[in-house]
Image (tube, rainbow, N blue to C red):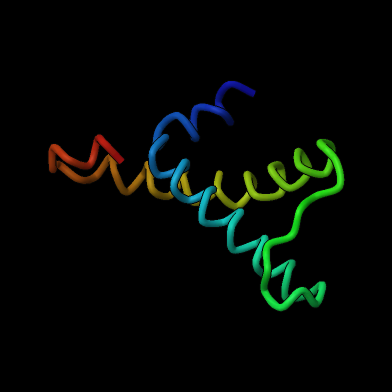
């Protein structure tokens, strides 16, 4: 379990920015599907919020793993901040 979470720790700022945009895009898409003309929608309870967070975390994990591998091959000093 710690090795799975270490992937997020290898690119924390990248994960933070990525998950914010992913959740926002998912919210807009849900608004379009539900017919609220692209307006933001809310979840009914905290359990649904955690479910959305878990669903967004899975593709973010793969993106963070790829970005961490990319970051290891770069020598620029500023890559470590992402």
Q: Quadrant of residue 37?
A: bottom right
Q: Quadrant of residue 29?
A: bottom right
In the displayed structure, 24 sits above or below 2; it is below
In the displayed structure, 35 sits above or below 60; it is below
Pick whichever, 22 or 59, lies toward us. 22
Q: Position of residue 7 (x, y in %)?
A: 49, 34
Q: Position of residue 45 (x, y in %)?
A: 85, 41
Label tally = 0
Q: Position of residue 24 (x, y in %)?
A: 59, 58
Q: Position of residue 16 (x, y in %)?
A: 46, 41
Outermost residue, top direction? 2
Q: Quadrant of the C terminus?
A: top left
In the displayed structure, 76 sits above or below 39; it is above
Pick whichever, 47 or 59, lies toward us. 47
Tell whether 31 sits left or right of 76: right
- Taking the spot 64% from the left edge, 24% from the top edge, the residue there is 1
Tell whether 3 sits left or right of 16: right
- Taking the spot 14% from the left edge, 41% from the top edge, the residue there is 75
Tell whether 76 sits left or right of 46: left
- Taking the spot 43% from the left edge, 49% from the top edge, the residue there is 66
- Taking the spot 26% from the left edge, 36% from the top edge, the residue there is 81
Tell whether 10 sits left or right of 76: right
């Amino acid at each position: 379990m710690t090795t799975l979470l270490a992937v997020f720790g290898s690119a924390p700022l990248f994960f933070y920015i990525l998950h914010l945009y992913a959740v926002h895009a998912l919210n807009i898409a849900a608004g379009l599907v539900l017919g609220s003309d692209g307006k933001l929608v809310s979840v009914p309870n905290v359990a649904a919020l955690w479910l959305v967070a878990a669903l967004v975390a899975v593709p973010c994990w793969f993106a963070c793993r790829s970005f961490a591998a990319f970051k290891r091959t770069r020598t620029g000093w500023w890559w470590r901040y992402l």
